[in-house]
Image (spheres, grey):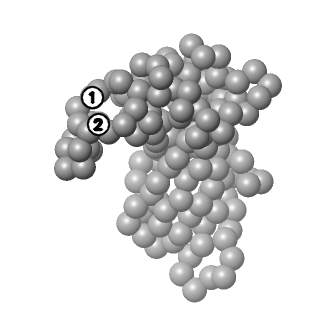
Amino acid sequence: MPYFRFPKQRQYKYELARGQFSPQDLDLDSHDVLDVLTELGVTSVYCRYNGGHDEGFAYLSGVKLKDEIIEFDDLKHQLAEGSLGIKKSKNLNRYYSYIGSPSKEQCVEFYLDGFARFLATRLLGQGYGTGEYSMKGAFKANLKTGQITDEQEQ
């Protein structure tokens, strides 16, 4: 759900966005996240994004497991005890090279946010959040069909 606000405007303007992803397009880290989530029984993920001018950000905010929504913090703690909590990758090592060794929860957060960024690029396009505007929104991705839909109501 891209809400755009251009300079000198007081309100955000809504523009509909739709996207699609395929497991074959995922990088190795995001593919591991997809495998872990589907193994758990997760059917959909919910993400938020924002950005403007020179960068865009995306964050996983929750997942749908059966008929229940699991919030990010609960999911992060649950996944920290599994393979994502101990997974090491070149990207993770590069990110934490100056900070020190990440905790299990930090590892999970790194991988979940990377997955959310991948999905956001499939919804909004490469380089989303860069331009003469501010943007914000939320979306839902169906892990079975690959359909990504914006959520106008936040």
In the image, taking residue 94 as reference, residue 140 lies left or right, namely right
The location of residue 37, given as percent across then percent down, is 56, 22
Residue 148 visible? The answer is no
Residue shown at 69% from the left, 62% from the top: 14
Label 2: which residue? Answer: 92
Residue shown at 58% from the left, 40% from the top: 73
How would you rate the neighbour count of disc 1 (Cα within 10 Å): few for under 14, some for 14-19, many for 20 or more? few
Q: Nearer the viewer, residue 98 or 18?
A: 98
Please, what secondary structure does the residue beneath circle 2 have?
helix
In the image, taking residue 17 as reference, residue 54 lies left or right, namely left
Residue shown at 26% from the left, 39% from the top: 101
Q: Residue furthest top?
A: 39
Q: Quadrant of residue 19?
A: top right
Residue shown at 67% from the left, 58% from the top: 15
Q: Is residue 2 above or below residue 30?
A: below
Residue 15 visible? The answer is yes
Q: Nearer the viewer, residue 68 or 16?
A: 68
Q: Is residue 143 above or below residue 131?
A: above
Q: Nearer the viewer, residue 113 or 120?
A: 113
Task: Give the numbered dot on residue 3.
Answer: none
Q: Residue furthest bottom?
A: 8
Do the residues under discs 2 and 1 have CB atoms within 8 angstroms?
A: yes
The location of residue 94, given as percent across then percent down, is 21, 41
Label 1: which residue? Answer: 89
The location of residue 35, given as percent across then percent down, is 49, 17
